Amino acid sequence: MPNKKTQHHSKVDEALNITEGKGFEEDLQALLTAENAEAGDNIIIVLVDLDEFMRVNTDFGFDEGDRVLIETGKHLMKYAGEQGTFYRVSGDEFGLIFKGEMEKEDIFLLMEDMRKSYNVKLPNGEAMTISIGIATAFENASRYQELFRMAESAMFRAKYSGRNKVALAKEEKMLPKTSHYTQDQLKRLNILSQREGVGEAILLREAMDMLLKKYDV
Protein backbone atom coordinates (compact mmCIF):
# COMPACT_ATOMS: atom_id res chain seq x y z
CA MET A 1 0.00 0.00 0.00
CA PRO A 2 1.53 3.37 -0.99
CA ASN A 3 2.44 5.68 1.85
CA LYS A 4 0.94 9.15 2.31
CA LYS A 5 3.95 10.89 0.78
CA THR A 6 3.81 8.69 -2.34
CA GLN A 7 0.07 9.31 -2.73
CA HIS A 8 0.58 13.07 -2.64
CA HIS A 9 3.44 12.91 -5.13
CA SER A 10 1.19 10.91 -7.48
CA LYS A 11 -1.52 13.56 -7.17
CA VAL A 12 0.89 16.30 -8.23
CA ASP A 13 2.38 14.26 -11.06
CA GLU A 14 -1.03 13.34 -12.42
CA ALA A 15 -2.21 16.94 -12.34
CA LEU A 16 0.90 18.04 -14.25
CA ASN A 17 0.87 14.95 -16.50
CA ILE A 18 4.47 14.07 -15.60
CA THR A 19 6.43 11.52 -13.58
CA GLU A 20 8.63 12.83 -10.80
CA GLY A 21 12.34 12.30 -11.37
CA LYS A 22 11.88 10.77 -14.83
CA GLY A 23 13.22 12.18 -18.04
CA PHE A 24 15.38 15.09 -16.94
CA GLU A 25 18.67 13.23 -16.59
CA GLU A 26 18.01 10.94 -19.53
CA ASP A 27 17.02 13.78 -21.85
CA LEU A 28 19.93 15.98 -20.82
CA GLN A 29 22.42 13.12 -21.14
CA ALA A 30 21.19 12.53 -24.68
CA LEU A 31 21.81 16.21 -25.53
CA LEU A 32 25.33 16.34 -24.13
CA THR A 33 27.01 14.86 -27.18
CA ALA A 34 30.03 15.87 -29.22
CA GLU A 35 27.72 16.34 -32.20
CA ASN A 36 25.59 18.91 -30.37
CA ALA A 37 28.70 20.64 -29.06
CA GLU A 38 30.04 20.99 -32.61
CA ALA A 39 26.63 22.01 -34.02
CA GLY A 40 26.59 25.04 -31.74
CA ASP A 41 22.99 24.69 -30.57
CA ASN A 42 22.42 26.32 -27.20
CA ILE A 43 21.49 23.86 -24.45
CA ILE A 44 20.59 25.61 -21.23
CA ILE A 45 19.20 24.07 -18.06
CA VAL A 46 17.17 25.80 -15.39
CA LEU A 47 16.51 24.52 -11.88
CA VAL A 48 13.66 26.06 -9.88
CA ASP A 49 13.06 25.50 -6.18
CA LEU A 50 10.27 26.80 -3.97
CA ASP A 51 11.55 28.91 -1.09
CA GLU A 52 10.80 27.52 2.38
CA PHE A 53 8.37 24.96 0.97
CA MET A 54 8.71 22.51 3.86
CA ARG A 55 6.76 24.80 6.17
CA VAL A 56 3.79 24.76 3.77
CA ASN A 57 3.15 21.07 4.48
CA THR A 58 3.88 21.60 8.17
CA ASP A 59 1.68 24.66 8.70
CA PHE A 60 -1.13 24.03 6.20
CA GLY A 61 -1.08 20.30 5.40
CA PHE A 62 -0.16 18.13 2.42
CA ASP A 63 -3.21 19.05 0.36
CA GLU A 64 -2.16 22.69 0.45
CA GLY A 65 1.40 21.64 -0.41
CA ASP A 66 0.06 19.76 -3.41
CA ARG A 67 -1.90 22.79 -4.57
CA VAL A 68 1.20 24.97 -4.36
CA LEU A 69 3.27 22.44 -6.34
CA ILE A 70 0.60 22.05 -9.01
CA GLU A 71 0.09 25.79 -9.48
CA THR A 72 3.86 26.31 -9.55
CA GLY A 73 4.32 23.58 -12.14
CA LYS A 74 1.62 25.03 -14.38
CA HIS A 75 3.23 28.47 -14.14
CA LEU A 76 6.61 27.06 -15.18
CA MET A 77 5.07 25.11 -18.05
CA LYS A 78 3.78 28.34 -19.59
CA TYR A 79 7.31 29.71 -19.71
CA ALA A 80 8.85 26.57 -21.19
CA GLY A 81 7.40 27.56 -24.56
CA GLU A 82 8.28 25.71 -27.75
CA GLN A 83 12.03 25.56 -27.11
CA GLY A 84 11.82 24.34 -23.51
CA THR A 85 10.81 21.11 -21.82
CA PHE A 86 9.39 20.99 -18.28
CA TYR A 87 10.30 18.43 -15.59
CA ARG A 88 9.67 17.78 -11.94
CA VAL A 89 13.14 16.84 -10.77
CA SER A 90 12.27 15.91 -7.17
CA GLY A 91 9.99 17.11 -4.41
CA ASP A 92 9.63 20.87 -4.82
CA GLU A 93 12.45 21.17 -7.36
CA PHE A 94 11.52 21.62 -11.02
CA GLY A 95 13.67 21.69 -14.13
CA LEU A 96 13.57 23.21 -17.61
CA ILE A 97 15.77 22.29 -20.56
CA PHE A 98 16.04 24.75 -23.44
CA LYS A 99 17.57 23.75 -26.77
CA GLY A 100 17.68 26.13 -29.71
CA GLU A 101 18.75 29.63 -30.59
CA MET A 102 17.97 31.36 -27.29
CA GLU A 103 21.10 32.62 -25.53
CA LYS A 104 21.61 32.33 -21.78
CA GLU A 105 20.91 36.05 -21.48
CA ASP A 106 17.53 35.48 -23.15
CA ILE A 107 16.78 32.63 -20.75
CA PHE A 108 17.83 34.78 -17.80
CA LEU A 109 15.38 37.53 -18.80
CA LEU A 110 12.66 34.95 -19.41
CA MET A 111 13.22 33.43 -15.97
CA GLU A 112 13.21 36.88 -14.38
CA ASP A 113 9.82 37.49 -15.96
CA MET A 114 8.66 34.06 -14.75
CA ARG A 115 9.82 34.84 -11.21
CA LYS A 116 8.20 38.27 -11.11
CA SER A 117 4.86 37.00 -12.44
CA TYR A 118 4.79 34.01 -10.08
CA ASN A 119 1.72 34.56 -7.91
CA VAL A 120 0.95 31.60 -5.65
CA LYS A 121 -0.36 32.51 -2.21
CA LEU A 122 -0.96 30.55 0.97
CA PRO A 123 -4.31 30.51 2.84
CA ASN A 124 -3.03 33.26 5.15
CA GLY A 125 -2.38 35.52 2.15
CA GLU A 126 1.40 35.12 2.25
CA ALA A 127 3.04 34.95 -1.18
CA MET A 128 5.30 32.05 -2.09
CA THR A 129 8.57 32.76 -3.93
CA ILE A 130 10.97 30.76 -6.09
CA SER A 131 14.74 30.69 -6.53
CA ILE A 132 16.24 29.83 -9.91
CA GLY A 133 19.64 28.66 -11.15
CA ILE A 134 20.81 28.57 -14.78
CA ALA A 135 23.72 26.70 -16.39
CA THR A 136 24.81 26.42 -20.03
CA ALA A 137 25.98 23.16 -21.58
CA PHE A 138 29.53 23.09 -23.00
CA GLU A 139 30.20 26.56 -21.59
CA ASN A 140 29.82 25.78 -17.90
CA ALA A 141 30.23 22.01 -18.18
CA SER A 142 29.94 19.15 -20.68
CA ARG A 143 29.15 16.34 -18.26
CA TYR A 144 25.68 15.84 -16.78
CA GLN A 145 26.68 15.66 -13.12
CA GLU A 146 28.85 18.77 -13.34
CA LEU A 147 26.31 20.78 -15.35
CA PHE A 148 23.52 19.87 -12.94
CA ARG A 149 25.74 20.71 -9.98
CA MET A 150 26.55 24.14 -11.39
CA ALA A 151 22.88 24.95 -12.02
CA GLU A 152 22.00 23.78 -8.51
CA SER A 153 24.88 25.77 -7.06
CA ALA A 154 23.54 28.89 -8.80
CA MET A 155 20.08 28.15 -7.44
CA PHE A 156 21.38 27.82 -3.87
CA ARG A 157 23.36 31.03 -4.33
CA ALA A 158 20.07 32.72 -5.22
CA LYS A 159 18.56 31.33 -2.03
CA TYR A 160 21.41 32.23 0.27
CA SER A 161 21.58 35.78 -1.06
CA GLY A 162 17.99 36.48 -0.06
CA ARG A 163 15.76 34.08 -2.04
CA ASN A 164 13.34 35.02 -4.83
CA LYS A 165 16.18 35.56 -7.31
CA VAL A 166 17.63 34.20 -10.55
CA ALA A 167 21.34 33.34 -10.67
CA LEU A 168 23.65 32.24 -13.48
CA ALA A 169 26.29 29.57 -13.01
CA LYS A 170 29.73 31.06 -12.69
CA GLU A 171 33.31 29.95 -12.57
CA GLU A 172 34.01 28.75 -9.07
CA LYS A 173 37.13 29.25 -7.03
CA MET A 174 38.50 25.79 -6.32
CA LEU A 175 40.50 24.95 -3.23
CA PRO A 176 43.39 22.46 -3.38
CA LYS A 177 43.12 18.99 -1.84
CA THR A 178 44.29 18.96 1.75
CA SER A 179 45.38 16.48 4.39
CA HIS A 180 41.72 15.63 5.04
CA TYR A 181 42.17 12.60 2.76
CA THR A 182 44.24 9.49 3.41
CA GLN A 183 46.94 8.37 1.01
CA ASP A 184 44.88 5.32 0.11
CA GLN A 185 41.81 7.45 -0.65
CA LEU A 186 43.80 9.72 -2.95
CA LYS A 187 45.32 6.73 -4.73
CA ARG A 188 41.90 5.19 -5.32
CA LEU A 189 40.58 8.58 -6.44
CA ASN A 190 43.35 8.77 -9.02
CA ILE A 191 42.49 5.28 -10.30
CA LEU A 192 38.80 6.23 -10.56
CA SER A 193 39.67 9.45 -12.35
CA GLN A 194 41.75 7.63 -14.95
CA ARG A 195 39.16 4.89 -15.39
CA GLU A 196 36.25 7.33 -15.92
CA GLY A 197 38.25 9.94 -17.81
CA VAL A 198 37.05 12.62 -15.41
CA GLY A 199 39.14 15.05 -13.39
CA GLU A 200 39.66 14.34 -9.69
CA ALA A 201 38.24 17.75 -8.74
CA ILE A 202 34.98 17.00 -10.54
CA LEU A 203 34.66 13.64 -8.77
CA LEU A 204 35.29 15.26 -5.39
CA ARG A 205 32.65 17.91 -6.06
CA GLU A 206 30.14 15.20 -6.99
CA ALA A 207 30.93 13.36 -3.75
CA MET A 208 30.52 16.54 -1.73
CA ASP A 209 27.16 17.26 -3.37
CA MET A 210 25.95 13.76 -2.50
CA LEU A 211 27.03 14.27 1.11
CA LEU A 212 25.28 17.64 1.40
CA LYS A 213 22.08 16.24 -0.11
CA LYS A 214 22.19 13.28 2.27
CA TYR A 215 22.12 15.65 5.24
CA ASP A 216 19.74 18.10 3.53
CA VAL A 217 22.13 21.06 3.59
Image: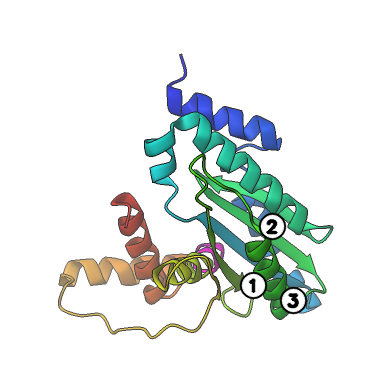
The residue under the point 69% across, 51% down is 75
Closer to the eye: label 1 or 2: 1
Q: Is residue 34 visible?
A: no
Which residue is nearer to you in this view: 72 or 47? 72
Q: Position of residue 140 (x, y in %)?
A: 57, 78
Q: What main secondary structure does the magenta stretch of the protein show?
A: helix
Q: Report which residue position mark 1 lands on.
A: 137
Q: Is residue 180 visible?
A: yes
Amino acid, disc 1: Ala
Residue at disc 2, secondary structure:
helix
Task: Please report whichever mark, 1 or 2, sits nearer to the chain's N-terminal start.
Answer: 2
CA separation in Å, label 1 and label 2? 12 Å
Q: Position of residue 145 (x, y in %)?
A: 50, 62
Query: Is 151 positioned to the left or the right of 102 in the image?
Result: left
Task: Please report whichever mark, 1 or 3, sits nearer to the chain's N-terminal start.
Answer: 3
Which residue is nearer to you in this view: 202 or 194? 202
Which residue is nearer to you in this view: 195 or 72? 72
Residue neighbourhood size for the residue with mark 1, other residues' Cα within 10 Å, grouped as few (<14), some (14–19), many (≥20): many
Could you say which disc has been placed on residue 30 in the image?
A: 2
Q: Which region shows up in magenta?
A: 144-148
Query: Is 85 positioned to the left or the right of 199 in the image?
Result: right
Residue at disc 3, secondary structure:
helix
Amino acid, disc 3: Asp
Query: Is 14 positioned to the left or the right of 49 in the image?
Result: right
Q: Report which residue position mark 3 lands on.
A: 106
- Look at the picture and state if 193 lies above or below 105: above
Closer to the eye: label 1 or 3: 3
